[in-house]
Amino acid sequence: MKILVTGGAGFIGSHVIRRFVTNHPSYTIYNLDALTYAGNLSNLSDIEKAPNYHFIKGDITDGPYIENLFSKYAFDKVIHLAAESHVDRSIEDPLSFVKTNIIGTVNLLNACKSIWGEDYTNKLFYHISTDEVYGSLGEDGLFTEESSYDPNSPYSASKASSDHFVRAYHETYNLPVVISNCSNNYGPNHFPEKLIPLCINNIIHQKPLPVYGDGKYTRDWLYVIDHAIAIDQVAHKGVVGETYNIGGYNEWQNIDLVKLLCDIMDEKLSRKQGSSQNLITFIKDRPGHDKRYAIDASKITKELGWKPSVTFEEGLRLTIDWYLSNADWLENVTSGNYLEYYKKMYS
Ligand code: NAD
Ligand code: TYD
């Protein structure tokens, strides 16, 4: 079984690669990644020498390259995570999201269609998507697999479009596909442009903690390793043509989450309780900011037996411990281009 994971050097992809390389030694796992600012091979240093793991540096937006790669390796399954993933960057540069998230996905679908021919036995294209495609919830309700698509940011619009293409290739060409839409992930190796690792980094350095608008926006947070476990289960037991929503049943308003992070970090860094909360700074809101996301994950629980395995407080503590004991990783990714990005977005 040859499995291609795209975007395996990124945050979620690296946890998926580690899980598959370790838990499925009979599979050969290929990691295709362009190593953009978000890709980092040091995320995988512990498994890079495993005999069933291979890294390929390549770009999913390059159609002819992808066709060649697929004819050379004849992958059986594709788990597709490669993407531009940050909403704020999508507001600055929507076209790069169109290229990677839409054209890149269609290139992969075309390559699967051409190498698999008519024989789809044991073949699968598994598309990893987000709950953001469903738009924004009001005070009540949860996103189910039946919720209509209503994306509001260039990022979520590009992911919604890629989901539609995946579905269309199933309907039109019978391609064996499955999609999962997950809520916000957090955990080790998360690039510090996203809320949780950005705040961890800023608390360490006693820099302001930028909270958009009134801070009352709500997200449903899931520990990244629980997402990787869900992806493993969907890849093995998911029904072709189906969508599975994955979430943490764990809603937090941003301001409460940032306060909790501050308190745990004050304790871990032996700082006076309350001192990090003084760093909280409300700043200009994100345009088109979605008010609330929350997932109904009952389908994957009922049909595939998956549920989150760690509580939020446990997951946050594990995450903070990882950042505190991997200062080199953090230092590496926050030097160079990150400083320019930070200045542009926050000054
Ligand atoms: P990430 O930004 O950390 O990683 C993306 C990876 O894709 C990087 O390694 C990058 O180098 C690679 N990549 C980007 N463009 C590429 C290209 N053209 N060719 C090949 N590789 C390329 O993203 P993430 O947070 O790990 O998200 C992974 C996937 O999961 C994405 O599809 C995202 O939409 C989805 N998702 C993320 C979350 C979340 O909370 N982070 C939640 C739900 C779904
Ligand atoms: P983020 O981690 O960017 O994920 P997403 O936009 O995909 O949900 O943001 C999570 C929430 O935190 C979102 O409501 C925006 C908010 N946020 C801030 O308040 N300040 C920040 O500096 C960032 C990056 C996000």
Image (tube, rainbow, N blue to C red):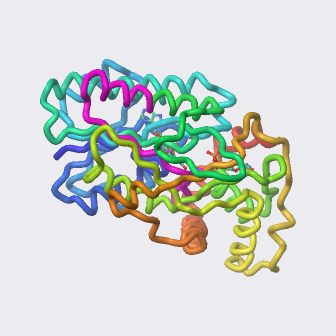
Q: Quadrant of residue 309?
A: bottom left
Residue 100: image location, x then y, percent: 48, 28
Q: Is residue 344 magenta?
A: no
Position above or below: 143 against 201? above
* Residue 6 makes an appearance in the image: no
Please name the residue shown 87% across and 66% down the image.
278
Q: Say left or right for 167 vs 3.
A: right
Residues in magenta? 163-192
Determine which quarter of the picture holds residue 149: top right
Q: Nearer the viewer, residue 205 or 62?
A: 62
- Is 56 left, or right, of 283 in this rendering? left
Which residue is found at the position 49% from the left and 27% from the top? 161
Residue at 68% in and 62% down: 200
Q: Front-most of 43 and 101?
A: 101
Residue 331 position, x and y percent, is 61, 56
Point 25% across, 57% down: residue: 50
Q: Position of residue 152 (x, y in %)?
A: 65, 32
Q: How many marks?
A: 0
Between 155 and 206, the residue placed more toward the observer is 155
The foreground one among 130 and 258 is: 130
Relative height, residue 193 to residue 21 (above, below): above
Give coordinates of residue 192: x percent, y percent: 63, 52
